[in-house]
Amino acid sequence: MKAANRKPSISQTSGGRAFELVNMGIILVLVILCLAPLLHIASMSLSSNRAILSGEVTVFPLEINLEAYRKIFQDNSMIRSLLLTVALTAGYTGLSMLMTIFAAYPLSKRLKGGKPIMFFIIFTMFFSGGTIPDYLLIRSLHLTNHLGSLLLPTMINPFFLIILITFLRSLPAGLLEAAEMDGSSHFHTLIRIVLPLSLPALATLSLFYAVGRWNGFMDALMYITDPRLYPIQLKLYQVVMNSMTNDPLSMQGDQVVSVLPEGIKAASIMFATVPILLVYPWLQKYFISGVMIGAVKE
């Protein structure tokens, strides 16, 4: 009798099912829009010259050809840029998370003077000095052609700092007070209690920092001119620009093109993209809960 009077949930009603179908359709379209360009680039990197020139390559490779990847792996400068970017991303992520944690933990405690500090942090989110003042500052600090120019200016992201502050304030206050009553120092409480409880936030912000540094291009373009210090994105830019000057259709006679510039560009893009994509599965279990930080207000 009770079951007969029970109201159907939103998902069980016809309107709810229609809403879910529309949502699934929209998500499916977005997934296709996101995956199609990546699959097209991957297919071009694996296809033959004839298939690329004829424009037959869509999202599946035709006449598999690995010559573009062979040329990339034979290029020592490309390998050096990749290894440099891996080390740069790892170091940048570690230092950024360390500085963000050390800034967020005291600010999460609503200490006296915290509001003015938060005001200046938020101010930097909306206003910056601009490209030319940034360059003059880096040059005056003698950081041009130095990896410090890629690490120091963006070491703390104000938006990520606010996210972590919000997360730390959501931790049970009684737990932290009990630790302090037991004689735990602030540093001990941070290391042994706060950080283990903050793994979803830390993993998510680490991923954001790592992806941002890996894809970083403008700062390297402005501050780095030494080819030995080129990160992979700047090296990729150089490859693309060089390929634009080589038109395979203009080559005649005995000139033989083993790999088209389009194939080299596509293989270079996959070479620079795949390593950072491999990071996502390791952080996926934290990512869903991490991106929801601050979404629910009680």
Image (cartoon, rainbow, N blue to C red):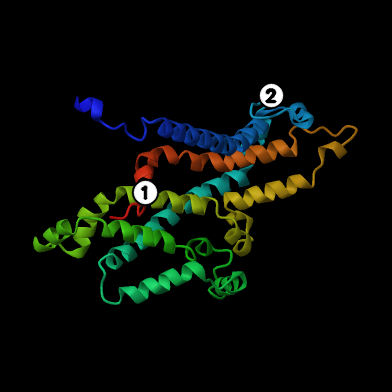
x, y percentage for residue 15?
43, 34
- Under circle 2, the secondary element is loop
Q: Quadrant of the N terminus?
A: top left
Tell me which amino acid carries mark 2. Leu
Looking at the image, is 48 positioned above or below residue 142? above
Regarding residue 156, the answer to whether it shows in the image is no
Q: Quadrant of the C terminus?
A: bottom left
Tell me which amino acid carries mark 1. Met
The residue closer to the viewer here, 156 or 229, is: 156
Q: Is residue 144 left or right of residue 252?
A: left
Q: Is residue 192 left or right of residue 267?
A: left
Q: CA distance from mark 1 to mark 2?
A: 41 Å
Please identify the quarter of the rendering in which residue 56 is found: top right
* Residue hosting label 2: 62
Q: Which class describes the residues within 10 Å of circle 1: few (<14), some (14-19), or many (20+)?
A: few
Please identify the quarter of the rendering in which residue 163 is found: bottom left
Residue 292 is marked as: 1
At x 50%, y 54%, the residue is 213
Regarding residue 148, the answer to whether it shows in the image is yes
At x 20%, y 55%, the residue is 172
Q: Which class describes the residues within 10 Å of circle 2: few (<14), some (14-19), or many (20+)?
A: some
x, y percentage for residue 32?
57, 34
Q: Is residue 104 left or right of residue 237?
A: left
